[in-house]
Amino acid sequence: MAEVLIGGIQRQPTDALSLVPKADAPQSAKDFKSDQEVRWCPGCGDYAVLAAVQGFMPELGLAKENVVFVSGIGCSSRFPYYMNTYGMHSIHGRAPAIATGLSTARRDLSVWVVTGDGDALSIGGNHLIHALRRNVNLKILLFNNRIYGLTKGQYSPTSEAGKITKSTPMGSLDAPFNPVSLALGAEAGFVARTVDSDRKHLTEVLRQAADHPGTALVEIYQNCNIFNDGAFEVLKDKQQAQEAVIRLEHGAPIRFGVPAEDGLGSKGVVRDQATGDLRIVEVAEHGTDGILVHDSHSESPTNAFALSRLADPDTLHHTPIGVFRDVRRPVYDTLMADQLETAVEQHGKGDLSALLHGRDTWTVAG
């Protein structure tokens, strides 16, 4: 892991979990299940994500008392009730802000944010992008069902243009956000996308996010079977998914579709020499030369951003899933702790009373 120069001092980014105490004994998924009745609509994709997270957490080997889930408002935001860890069901859109304070004040905690497309990208958009750019040590799970489920089916910031809902009876006029593109534009060091029903892929992405020092954003395509059922069916149906889903693997050529003679996908992703954009080609016609090899560790986010733009927002054809970007940047929590330590070394501990009664205060006459 490369060192970085901060304020003239060599600093080395710390491991994401190095300061969090380990559990005294091996744990199982049962240890992370609370005694609360899980209450989502039958068939909701949130159940699958909850099961995956509960099943994955024991792998981290962390003391439950040092794991925290913070949520905002929305269906997904009931998550902290169902995790046998510390947690907080906070206010609409503010989960990243609350989690930032917690993570920076208590570096011995593993802090996770659970949010939805409405919670994170509408009222909470400002908090989200600043957490990403600061690179606070947070793991943000963004459940994207492209609808407001809790408030009964209004269009959300990720709903496709023309979406007919209770609040847009003639179709939405808004252009939707692409959460992966947004995160990359905010300089996030770790950005990934997965699907609620693909337990193996979801778990692997969570594993990589947990290992990443700094902010990790994972967009999870999640089905709302009541108000937006089948929104991601093309990515889940076995036959359709073969032609629609592009699975990103670091160091591997970006191939998908029906297997070709070499065992890899019959379609590939190349860079158009004329426009510089990425496009899909038939390997049988184009050949393997020029097929893009995925590099999630590239310092430049250029290819990751271009990959995030491949998917058609209406049909979802050519939708990449996996880790788009995984690069190491200075972690905000570490930088702040170092800065405070340096201040104490140079100036001693602060005197709150002296500050409050200093020359920059005054008395207002009654």
Image (spheres, rainbow, N blue to C red):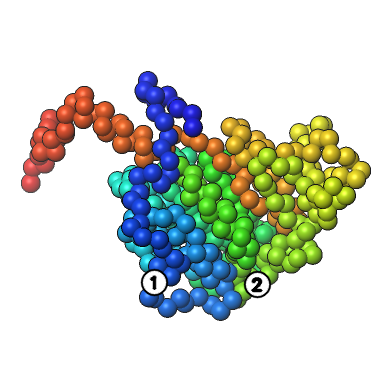
* Left or right relative to 269: residue 7: left
Residue farthest along the right direction in this orientation: 285
Query: Which mark, by number, is residue 229?
Result: 2
In this orientation, which residue lies closer to the viewer: 319 or 250? 250
Callout 1: 10 Å neighbours few (<14), some, many (20+)?
some
Query: Which mark, by number, is residue 34?
Result: 1
Callout 2: 10 Å neighbours few (<14), some, many (20+)?
some
Q: Amino acid at mark 2?
A: Asp
Residue visible at 86% across and 51% down in the picture: 260
Looking at the image, residue 45 lies above or below residue 254: below
Q: CA distance from mark 2 to mark 1?
A: 28 Å
Q: Residue 36 occupies which quadrant of the picture?
A: bottom left
Residue 342 x/y as whole percent: 26, 28
From where the camera sits, is residue 115 visible?
A: no
* Left or right relative to 347: residue 63: right
Label 2: which secondary element: loop
